[in-house]
Image: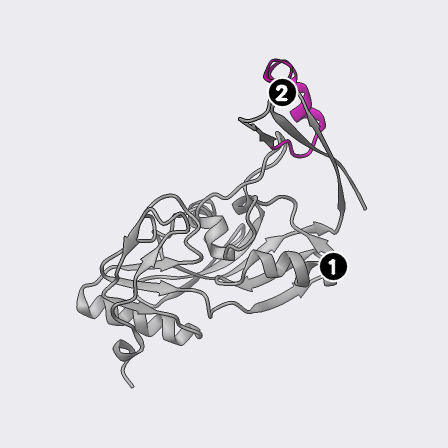
Amino acid sequence: MSIGSLGKSGTCFNNWSKTYYYTPELYFEPKTTEEIKQILCYASEKGKKVKTVGCGHSFSDLACTTDFMISMARYNRVLKIDKEKLQVTVQGGCLIKDLNEVILPENGMAFSTQGTVSSLTAAGVISTGTHGSGANFSNISASVVDLELMLSSGEIIKVSNTENAELLPVVSLSLGSVGVILSITFQCERAFNLHWKQYPDTLGNLHQQVSLIHQHQLQVPLVNQSHAQVPLAHKLHLKSY
């Protein structure tokens, strides 16, 4: 069976907010590294561009294409767990939700920060600069220890602080523009609990205290309720182990 026959035609893709719809010429859901390589080589032969997509959780048309699209949905295995270093290595299509709810808790680990939504792929959260809140947090891509990247030629390169180090900040937040991210090793930390305090306040008070709040709290999501007289502020306090 040729690799071209593994692609589906007529598959309509839309982002989560349904603001963009595209129908790629061929839509692929590879399960193996070899299949991804064959797709890229086939695209090169046909002169087609390739876009990879995770869960499409973006307001933009970043993943949309009329050429070839690769979904990472089936390329989603957990490859390695290192309890001593508090690191986890996963394939690019592994869901953050699965790591949060099953894999990391079972091994006494947790991400240091994350976005509001967890139904996202590992490659997707780093490639798009997904972040949480709080003055002392970086985005999730900053927790990448190393990763494997497949170039359009099918060549696989490893990127880390010691190997192709100059590429690490580029590939870790690449918007899918430099190749297919095959695997990622995340630096985690020991599992912890968050103490959550929720209270109403006025915009004036919040504006005066915002710098102080961010310095002393881990995460501070603010929710404005238009039907209420005051906005609703959420404060997530210090961790407990």
- In the image, 160 versus 12, the foreground residue is 12
> As displayed, is residue 65 above or below residue 235?
below
Q: Main secondary structure of the magenta part?
A: helix
- The answer to which quarter of the image holds residue 206 is top right
Q: Is residue 218 inside the magenta stretch?
A: yes
> As displayed, is residue 79 above or below residue 167?
below
The residue to which callout 1 is attached is 84
Magenta residue span: 202-221
Instruction: Please tell me the numbered disc located at residue 211.
Output: none
> As displayed, is residue 36 above or below residue 218?
below
Viewed as shown, does residue 84 lie left or right of 1? Answer: right
What is the count of numbered marks?
A: 2
Identify which residue is drawn at 52% across, 56% down.
122
Identify which residue is drawn at 59% across, 45% down.
114
Q: Position of residue 8 (x, y in %)?
A: 29, 72
- In the image, 230 versus 62, the foreground residue is 230
Instruction: Please tell me the numbered disc located at residue 210.
Output: 2
User: Could you tell me which secondary element the residue under label 1 belongs to?
Assistant: loop
Q: Position of residue 11 (x, y in %)?
A: 30, 66
- The answer to which quarter of the image holds residue 137 is top right
**Amino acid on which disc 2 is placed:** Val
- In the image, 151 versus 77, the foreground residue is 77
Q: CA distance from mark 2 to mark 1?
A: 37 Å
Can you say which quadrant of the picture contains the N terminus? Answer: bottom left
Q: Position of residue 103 (x, y in %)?
A: 67, 63
> As displayed, is residue 152 above or below residue 18?
below
Identify which residue is drawn at 57% across, 38% down.
138
